Amino acid sequence: MILKKNNLLLSIIFFTTFSFTQEVDQELLSNLSPDEIEAAKELLESRNILEPENQDIPEIEESLVDLEDIDDESASNKFGYDFFSSMPTSLSAIGDLPLPADYKISLRDQLRVILSGSRDQIFNLNVNLDGTILFPELGSVYVAGLTFREVKDKLSNLINQSFIGVNIDISLQNLSAKKVTIVGAVKSPGTYLINPFSTITGALAYSGGISEIGSLRDIKLVRSNGTVFSFDLYDLLIRGDRSNDLAIEAGDTILINAASKFIEIKGAVNRPAVYEVLDDEEVGDIINFALGFTQTANKSNISITYLDLDNSSIETKTKVDLNEELKNVLVVDVFNYLNENNLSLIVSGAVEEPGFYDLEKYKNLNDLIKDLEFVDVYPWLAVLEQFDDDNLIKSSILFSLNDKSTYQSVELLPNSKLYFANIDERLFTVGEVAAKLIDEYSLILNYKDDSYELPVIGEYSVKEFINLLGLDMSDINKNATYISPLDSIIISDSYQNMNFIAKKYNTVSFRSPVNDLISVRIDGAIDYPGTYTLEADSTLDDLYRLIGDFKSEAFLDGVVLQRLSVRERQMKAIESSEAALNRSMLFSMQQGEDIGDISILTSLAESIEPENLGRIAGNFSPLSESSKNIILFDGDTVVIPKISNVINIIGAVLNPIAFEYSERMRIESAIELAGGYQAYADKRRVYIIKANGLVEKSNRNIFQGNYSLQPGDTVVVPRKINTNSSVIQGLMPIMQILSDLSFSAAALDNLTDN
């Protein structure tokens, strides 16, 4: 009996030592005498266990809440989003889980410190809101934010410095929940208290998981100090790598941005689904996401459906390389190897049910077409690509749904491909041979300034294509011209009666008054300036009859006519002259030849304004022979300047100026008014650009006799270039071109600015 009570006493002591937070069972105490209870009490006090007052230790609770309670969205084929199909709600750490050495101490954690040796004590120490623990006899010690290993080292050093012969053992008694904010594309964004052992993925479960617009590939973890980490959930879901699934710290923020690109992979892969892809990933990557090919997959027969941004359409491309980028791709389809006796015909394009069709069900192409339902199909041409294994013949057959004779007797072979185009896009995803054949059988419709290519085979009517394109025929001549060059056939007839059997290189052209009209712009001193539409053979005099009256200040001797084609030729001349000049100067410098200061040459082209080019010189005043004879071109510009009462002096004079015209003014007098010649002036080559653009040169004795300047004249004094450089001498013709164009443009600018 005595032995039994001693054992009971030891049990109570042991229980109270290691379960000090619990009350002693009253049934145990009732079996002890008062002396035994007192002995147990003294022994317990000798252990010196100290713990904080009013200690609230949360109970461990573990439960799973089905996400259906917070989200009843229908299941999706997007991969990875069901990873968060259940949500843990426990806030306390599980007691039997190992504590990692890099666990960081946070507020309200509880440390157990056991001293042994010369001191025999146990302390339960809470981490206060200021991040410290209050260690008896040592004071406050800051531990928040330190790892568990760092705290152990720190307290061990303090004990060794403060006491002799004391050993210390430290453990974490209780762990506090971590406060984390989860925002972005999650089902329930907000701030949560989470299990202290939670990682990024565990924390996301508290918010119900990532919504299906959110990215699994770029999850951001933002620490309280601003440091940002990225985590790709596919690393864990596909590769089993959770090295970047970091542990959560108090004050962290998890940000889920919207996903930018999803691609569906289907067909002969082990896990067909919709996957999120990154910009630099390829076809091979998404196949790996889908756990690779099935046993029957044809690895050389993969198609992609992609968005063609240039044509604003969705296209399909077959036989794709695994290294091809997934840019603008919507769907990847991996085909099985075809069985010659089953599903050996593939139909694609504008059909309701694209895919494989059992060849044994159809005697010929006509039977198959009867079984198909079309969606916005282009009926005038479709393509059948086949390969005759017995005779080793590859064929591309064009046929028309509008002409039964083109397909009713066509036999189907195993592994054939049938393609129907969309009526709006009229694009065919076929092989090179078939594509070339389609181009050859494309009807060209020439309508006004536009041309339309319409693939067609078999019988067709021109009126059908007019209706398809929605062409406005109200201003079109009824008679159109049909040309079949291979048959040497030209037919001119009403387009409403044109019914043909398609031939290669067919063309139908419509004639419109628009084709025989030109647009000409006239500005300046007239009553009704603007753009006028004329017949193609109209003259300048015809234009004058349309514009009303000339204003009183109109300078009819200086009418300016500019033509686009002339301007383009002059611009090309300037560009080629500049290029030749630069090449020659570069060659001279490489040869070490001194060519002197030629900046004046290089600046000639830069001084020419394109809008002052393109002038056709001549007397274009009303009723003049030139205005009656010159034929206007589309895009011509006519300017009627105001009366010019000035003389312009440009070139190598001391003061290039414009001054008021006076009667019987001679050239020498005008040059004197401009300060006279510069030292390098070429006096023998002085010439005059008249207001009408024509030139009077010095060899016509303009310095002699009674020749007088007229209003609007421009006197040009060229520059003399003295050089011993053979290169510069060789470039003289080029420089002459640039000089003449520069002076002509300056004269026109002066005339139209007055």
Image (spheres, rainbow, N blue to C red):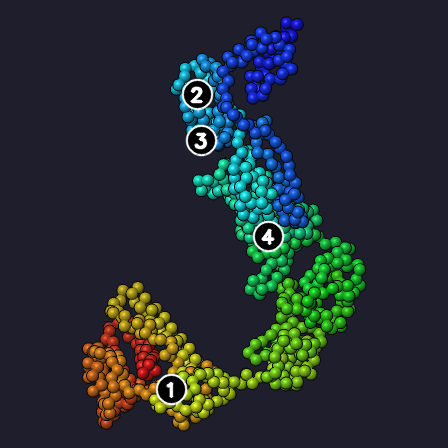
Location of the N terminus (image quadrant): top right
Vertical arrangement, residue 200 with respect to residue 730, above or below? above
Q: Earlier in the sequence, mark 3 or mark 1?
A: 3
> Are there few (<14), some (14-19), or many (20+) residues within 10 Å of tag 1?
many
Q: Which residue is mark 2?
A: 136
Q: Marks 1 and 3: in contact by CB < 8 Å?
A: no
> In percent of the image, x 40 and y 79: which residue is there?
567
Q: Report the amino acid beneath label 3.
A: Gly
Q: What distance separates the C-alpha of mark 3 from that of mark 1?
A: 89 Å
The label number, if any, that marks residue 525 in the structure image: 1
Q: Which residue is mark 4?
A: 262
**Nearest-to-viewer mark from 1 and 4:** 1
Disc 4 secondary structure class? strand
Disc 3 secondary structure class? loop
Q: Earlier in the sequence, mark 2 or mark 1?
A: 2
Q: Mark yes or no: residue 427 visible.
A: yes
Q: Nearer the viewer, residue 34 or 414?
A: 34
Instruction: Give the side of residue 207 with respect to residue 696, left or right.
Output: right
**Nearest-to-viewer mark from 4 and 3:** 3
Q: What distance separates the C-alpha of mark 4 from that of mark 3?
A: 46 Å
Instruction: Give the side of residue 713 with respect to residue 533, left or right.
Output: left
Disc 1 secondary structure class? loop
Q: Earlier in the sequence, mark 4 or mark 3?
A: 3
> In percent of the image, x 50 and y 30: which residue is there?
108
Vertical arrangement, residue 278 with respect to residue 478, above or below? above
Q: Which residue is mark 3?
A: 131
> In percent of the image, x 62 and y 45: which residue is there?
80
Location of the C terminus (image quadrant): bottom left
Q: What distance separates the C-alpha of mark 2 from that of mark 3?
A: 16 Å
Q: Earlier in the sequence, mark 2 or mark 3?
A: 3
Q: Position of residue 124 (x, y in %)?
A: 50, 23
